[in-house]
Image (cartoon, coloured by chain):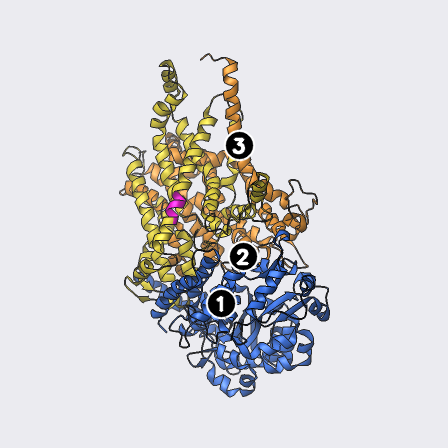
Amino acid sequence: MGIGRRPMVGYLYILPLLVLLGLLSVYPALSVLWMSLQSIELANLGAAEFAGLKNYLLLLKSTSPTLGEALGLSFLFVFVSVVFHVFIGFSLANLLAIPWVKGKNAWRNLYMISWVAAGIVIGYTFRFFFEPRAGVLNYLMRLAGLAPRSWAADPKLAMPAIIIVNIWRGVPYSLIIETAGLQSINTELYDAARVDGANAWQMLMRVKIPIVKDFLLLDIILDTTDTFQVFETILAITGGGPLHQTETLALYMYNQAFRYGDVGRGSAIGVVLLAISIVFAVIYIRFFRPGKEEL
Amino acid sequence: MKKIGMMVFVLSVFVSFDIFAWGGGGEKPITLNVAVRDYTLDNEPPWKTGAAAYQKLHPNVKIVFEGLPYDDMRNKVLIAVAAGKGPDIAYVDCIWLGEYASNKIIIPVTKYMNATPALKNDLYSPFLAGATWKGEIYGPWSHTDVRTLVWNKDMFKAAGLDPEKPPTTWSQLREYAKKLTNPSKDVWGFGFPAFASEGSLDMWYPFVYQGGKGILSDDFTKAIFNQPHGVAAMQLYYDLMWTDHASPTDLIGVEEGQHTDGFDAGKYAMIIMAGTNKTNDAYADLTRQQFEARVGAAPYPLAPGGKVATGSGGWIIGITRDAKNPDVAWDFITSVLKTDNLVDFVVADGDEATYKSVVASPKYKEYLPQYPVRFGLMDSTHFRPPVPEYLKIADALLNAMQKVLTQKASAQEALNEAALIADSLLAQRKW
Amino acid sequence: MRRSPIRLLPVKTLVYALLLVWALLTILPLYWVFSTAFKSPEEARGYPPTLIPHSFSFRNLVQVFDDPQTHKSLGFKPYLNSLIIALGTALLTATVSFLAGFGFARYRFRGREVLLLSLLFINMLPEMAKMIPLFRMFILYHLYDTYLGLILLLAAGSAPFSTWLMRGYIKSIPQDLEDSAVIDGCTRGQASRRITAPLAAPGLAAVAVLAFRAAWNEFSAALILTTSDSVRPYTTAIFKYVKEHASVDWHLLSAASFVSIIPIVIAFAFFQRYFVGGLTRGAVKD
C-alpha cells in the first residue's frame, strides 16, 4: 500500500455502499424471515401478529398449487432453461471463436438484442407470437401441415412455451461468459494440441472444456439464481396459468402476497426462494472464492 | 425489533403532523379525500356535480377526488390506510366487503343508514343485504351491473329460430346452441367466459343460484358448491363444450374482453355477460331501439325445477377508519346520492342503478337497453360471498372449472377438491 | 495448418448457417412485433398474417403516445419516469461503486476480505424474496411510490457487482500516479478524483450502462413499489396499459412494444463496448 494511507480512511470510502446495502439488501433479507412468522395481510399491514410457524404449516398443506408443485415447476423451468442456455451459449461462443469467422462483433451484438430488451416487452412479444389465431407460430404450424394449438392456454404446452421464451432470452448472457472463458485459453495450447494431431472433437474435450469448465460452472450458478427469479415474462404470457401450470415460485409469492393479500404466506414463500439462492451462493463462493492475494 | 420500533416512531411523527394539519370539525376548514373509480370522474355526475352542490352549502368543506383503476382501488386504499393516511371515503368492490370490514379498513354506517330511511328504503333489498357484513351495514351503493344471457337476433333468424324467443331452459339452451354452431366458420352457439379470472366464475354463479342455494352455506362456514345444484351447473358447461360441441374448446384461453368482442363480431350467437354491451364500439352509432333489434337480453335459462336468479357486482361507498369527520363524510355521500344526480350518472356512464327511485325514473327507462328484463331481475339478484377468503376460494373454484373443461376431472371430483380447499380456508377464519 | 479450400468450404457453410439460424430465431419474434406495429387493426388480427404490412402507417405509434379520442394511450410520461429512474440509478451506482471500489483497491482495513466476499453473497440474494419487507418498509418510510425509493433500491441491486468491477479497474491503474500527485501537494481525496477517476472512466462507463440497462428494464420492484402515473416507469405502465386497453388489440400492443424496445437497442448500439466489456470482466473477475 502506498504512502500516507491510513487504513481507517478506507471505511469512509465504502461507507455509502455499506449503508445502501445494509438498508436495502441485508435488512429486507433478514426481515422476510421475521415477517414469515407473522400473521399479516395486505389489509392489516400495520397490525401484524406473531403466528409462529403457521404460515409454513399452511404452505405445506396448500393444494392450489401445492408447494411441491410450485417447487417442481420452478426446478423444471430452471433446469431446462439453464441446460439450453449453457449449451447454445457455449456452441455459439465456439463458433465465434473460430479465427476465420467474419463479423464476430456484429453477430454477437445481434444475438444480444434479446438480452437488451425488457423482460415484460419480450413477454408481450411472445404472447403475440403464441396467439392462437393471429400468432405467427400457429401460422408456421399450419404451413407445416400441423394443427394449430393455443400455446399459452393449454396446460400441457404453457410450460414448454415459457421455457422456450426464457431460453431465447438467456442465451446471450451465457454467450458472453463462455466467450470470456474461451479467450482465457492460451493459444499455445491449441498449437500444442494440433501438433499432437488432435481433431476438433478431441480439442474440445481435452483442451477447451477442462479449461473453460470454471466458466461453465460460473455460468450455471449465476444463471440458475437468475432464472429462479424470472417473473415478468411469465406474468405477461400466462400469468401463472393455466391451472397453475406455469406458477413458478416468484409468481406464487407475488400472487399470494399481492393478489390474494396474504403477506405472511407470501413471506414464507420468499424464505423458500431465499433458501434456494443461499445454497447456490454458498457453492458459488466456495468454488470461486478468490485467493488471499486476489483480495 | 428495534428497527420496527424506530419505524413506528417515525410513522407516528408523520401521522401526528397530519392530525395537526387537518384540524378538527366545526367551522374550521375540513378536507374530504374521496377515492373513487376513475371512470366515475369522466362525467360531471355524480361526484363533480355532487361536490359542487355540497360546497355551495358548506364552503368550509374542501373535497379532493382521486380516480383509481380497479387494482389500485384496492391496493392504494389498503396501503394508505396501513400508513394511517387513508382517504375519508373509498369505493369498495362488494367482494372485498368482508376483508375490509373485519380488518376495520372501513367503518360500519348502520346508525347513519337507520337515520336516513329515505336512502335505506330506496335500495333494492338484495343490495342492502349485499352491503351488510355480520349484521352491520357498511355503506350505500354507487352502481351495479346485472348478469344476463345476451343473444344475437340476426344469427337466430339465420338458424331458423325465433329471434324474439331466447332459450328459457337448459335443454333449450343446449338445443339452440347446437343449431347455431358452425365450427368450419368458427361460429359457436354459446360462449361463456372460462379464462383464469374471477369474472369467469361470476358469470357462472347464476346457474348455481337457480338451485335455490348459493356458493357457501348461509353462515359462510362451508362450501356447498359441490352439492347437486353446483355440480349440475358445472356439468352444463361441460356438456355444451364436449357433448354438444356448441362452445369452442379453447374458451379457457379467451380473455374477458375477447369474449364480448367475439359476440359483437358474430363469433358467438349467445353469451352471458355483466351489464350491457350497448356501450361497445360495435354499436356506437345505434339508438337504443336499433340496438335492441339486434341484441336481446334475457334471464339465464333455467335448470329443471330451478328458479330465476342472477348475480350482481358493483361498488359500495365506504367511510374509512382514517376519516377524521365521519359525520361530514356521511353527509356528503347522502347529498351526492340524490335521485336526479344518480340518474344522470348511470345514464352518462352506462351503468345500472341499485335504487328503486332511479330505476323508476323515466329518463332511466328511456336509456337502459332491455329495461324490462333488467328491471325484472333486481329482486332476484345474488352476491358473491363477501368473506375475506373469497378470492382464494374463487381461485380454487376456477381451477376446478378449468380442470373440468380440459377433461382432467369430472364436475363432481373437481368441485369436491375445490370444496376441501374452501373448507380449510374457512376453518382458519379469524372473523 | 494446411487445409485444402475444398475441405474447408462445407465447414464454413455449416458454421455460417448455424450462426444465421440463431440470428433468425433472435430476430423473427421481434420482426413480427415491429411489423405489426405499422399494420391496421384489421390487418394485425387478420389471417393469414402478413409478412410486410400492406396498410403501412404510423397511426398506432402516434396512438401509443397520444389518443385524444379514446384515451387509450400510454403517453410520454412513463418513458420520462423510466429515464429519470435509470439515470438516477446509473449515477448513484457509479458514485457508490467507484468510492467503494477505490476503498477496497487502495486501503487495507480490517474485515476487507469478509466484506468483499459478502458482496458476492449479497449479489445472489433474490430480489423477489426481499420485495415484501421492502414493500412494508417503503410504506412506513414514505419511499413508496417515489423516484428516490426506486433509485436507492435499484442502485443497491447493481452496487455489489459494480463494486467488484470498479475495484478491478482501479487495481489495474498503477498507484504510483496517485502517489506522485500527493507528493506534488494533492490530498489523497483530490488524487483519487483527479487522477484515478479519469483513468477508471471505461470502468465507470461500464458500471453506469449496466446499471442503466437494469433500471430501464426493471419490472417487479416498480410493480410492487409504485402506483401512480407520476412515478410509474414504462415497464409497469405498459403492463397496466395492456391489461386495461390493449390485451386483444395486437396493433396497439405491438406499437407499445416497439417504442419500448427501440431506445434501449439504440443505446446498446452506442455503448455495446461497455456493456460487453463490463459483463466479460465480471465473468473473468480480475
Question: Which color has been applied to chain C in this rendered view?
Answer: orange
Question: Mark 3 falls on what kind of element?
Answer: helix
Label placed on residue A2? none
Asked if marks 1 and 2 touch (Cβ < 8 Å), the reply is: no
Q: Please report the bounds of the magenta region as a residue range.
A: A73-78
Label 2 sits on residue: B251
Percent position (x, y) of residue B120? Answer: 53, 84
Chain of the residue where label 2 is placed in the rendered structure = B
The residue pinned by badge 1 equals: B233
The answer to whether B278 is drawn above or below residue C19 in the figure is below
Q: Horizontal placement of A27 versus B56: left or right? A: left
Task: Let me know if marks 3 and 1 both belong to one chain.
Answer: no
Residue C207 in which image quadrant: top left
Colour blue, chain: B
> Which chain gets the yellow colouring?
A
Say which of B301 and A62 sits in front: B301
Amino acid identity at mark 3: Val
The residue nearer to you, when weighing A84 against C159, is: A84
Q: Secondary structure at mark 1?
A: helix
- Could you confirm whether marks 2 and 3 are on the same chain? no
Q: Which residue is mark 3?
A: C21
